[in-house]
Structure formats: C-alpha cells, structure tokens
Amino acid sequence: MSTTTNSGAGKRYLPAILEAATRCFARTGYHGTTMRDIGAETGMHAGSLYVHIRTKEDLLDAIVWEIAQSTERRMEAVLATEAAPLEKLRTLAEEHLRWVAQNPDAATVYFHEWRHLKDERLERVKQARARWTRGLREILQAGVDEGTFRAMDVRMAGLAFVGVLNSTQGWQRGEADPETAEIAGTFLDFLLDGWLPR
C-alpha cells in the first residue's frame, strides 16, 4: 500500500498506526480527526507519523481498501458454493454480524467514512462495493428463479438485506458469541417473510 515506506521501522509501526487511525476515524470521523489525534493514540509525535505515511487519506484508503477486498473475497467464496440461495444469504448474514461484532470501529469506518476518499481511490472502492452488490443480487435472483422467493425487485430486496444487517451496528459490540447465528437467523426471518411466495 502507499502508506508504507521502504524502511523496516515504517513496516513495524504501520499496523499500530492503522489501528489508531481506525479508532480515531470511528470516534470522530475522518474530517474530525487530525494527525495529532492519531499520533496521540499511538503515543507518537504527529510529525513522526510522516516517517511512515504520506497523508491522512493514505490511512483511510488502507483501512477501507483492505475491508473492501476482504468483503469481496467472502462474497466470491459464498457464490462459489453449491448452497441454495437462502443458505447463501444466511451465511452472508452470519459472517457480516460476526465481523461487525468483532470489528466495530472498522465497520464504522467502512460503512460511513469511505466516501471521503478522492478520485481513483474513491472510484476503486465504489467498484468493489458494486461487485459485492451484484453478487448479492445474483443470489436473490437465483432465489426468485427457483421459486424460493416471490417475484420481486431484487435491487430493492438487496437494499433491504443490507439495511437490516447494518442496523445492528452499535448494538452488537464486543466479541461474537454463539448467538450470532441465531441473531442472523432472526433478522433474516423478519426480512424473508415478505419475500416468500404467497
């Protein structure tokens, strides 16, 4: 990533800097966070951060792009299975809730702060999110085609699916527990009741 330097010290400190930036961006937003804030979070002088990174946007890009790539890989893995559409949705829901529970600050940054990226970086993330969305719609359309779901606008259904899952952010914090699958199932039951054939 563009946030690293060629020095061993830069590579050694970068994870701690990224973690600190994630906490700061989640707490006060990208624009509300200064390099001094990130430095204080890491115990470093703000000026020392520039030994390891170039700009604050480099940090946001590194955080968001790593999550975008991970999210895409999870979707590709689910799409590649032979599971039925409904089971694919349940898998996505469980994985999403588990990730949000274990990474609440990263989730906040990914859900809300990515729009502050600029130019090629913003476009790259938009495209990654669009590919994930196409995967979700593919699953929903397969469910419609096989009769599991009633005929519906899969675009709107996809928005509803994501909206219901993202509504748990801030409510489900801390380590994921054995109830994650049950919670995912309950949310999907609420949502899918309107999708099933009548």
Image (cartoon, rainbow, N blue to C red):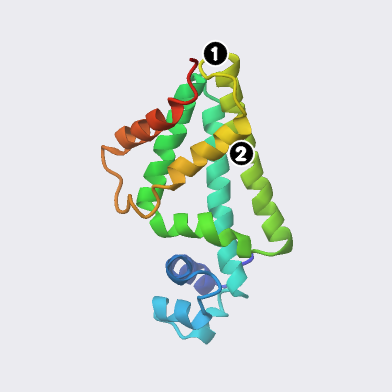
Q: Amino acid at mark 1?
A: Gly
Residue 97, quarter of the rendered image: top left
- Work out whether residue 1 can be spotted: no
Residue at image location 53% in from the left, 51% down from the top: 67
In the image, which disc is placed on residue 168?
A: none
- In the depicted structure, whether residue 114 falls above or below residue 36: above
- In the depicted structure, whether residue 23 falls above or below residue 164: below
Residue at image location 56% in from the left, 28% down from the top: 79
Q: Position of residue 3 (x, y in %)?
A: 59, 68
Q: Position of residue 33 (x, y in %)?
A: 50, 76
* Residue picked out by circle 2: 133
In what element is the residue under mark 1?
loop
* Residue picked out by circle 1: 147
Q: Residues within 10 Å of mark 1 (few under 14, many from 20)?
A: few
Q: Nearer the viewer, residue 43 or 162?
A: 162
Q: Nearer the viewer, mark 2 or mark 1?
A: 1
